[in-house]
Image: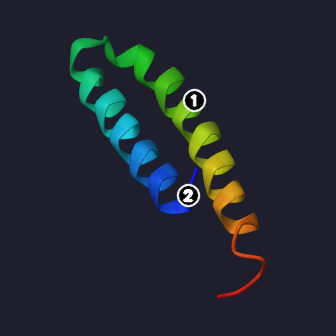
Amino acid sequence: MEPAELARRTLEATKERLAALDERPTHEHVEVFDSLHQELTAVLGSLDQGTDGAR
């Protein structure tokens, strides 16, 4: 998958999950935030590796 497409899909999925927090009790938000943090870290790492160090 192209980096731009991966970033777009990740952004959309993240926005959907954050929007769904309104329907969940506050004490469940931490679990969602932790999960999103792990997923976003992994995606950013894979995108960074795809740049071959070029910035």
State the residue at coordinates (58%, 50%): 1
Choose the circle earlier in sequence order: 1 or 2: 2
Q: Amino acid at mark 2?
A: Glu
Provide residue 50's location: percent of width, then percent of height. 71, 66
Provide residue 14's location: percent of width, then percent of height. 39, 38
Residue at image mark 2: 2
Residue at image mark 1: 35
Q: Secondary structure at mark 1?
A: helix
Instruction: Say few, some or many: other residues with alpha carbon within 10 Å of mark 2 (under 14 / 14 to 19 / 20 or more).
Output: few
Instruction: Say few, some or many: other residues with alpha carbon within 10 Å of mark 1 (under 14 / 14 to 19 / 20 or more).
Output: few
Provide residue 18's location: percent of width, then percent of height. 32, 32
Most distant residue in the front direction = 1
Quadrant the C terminus occupies: bottom right
Q: Is residue 45 above or below residue 13?
A: below
Compare residues 50 and 40 and report the one nearer the observer.
50
Q: Is residue 41 above or below residue 22?
A: below
State the residue at coordinates (76%, 65%): 49
Q: What whole-number distance in Å separates the C-alpha atoms at marks 1 and 2?
A: 23 Å
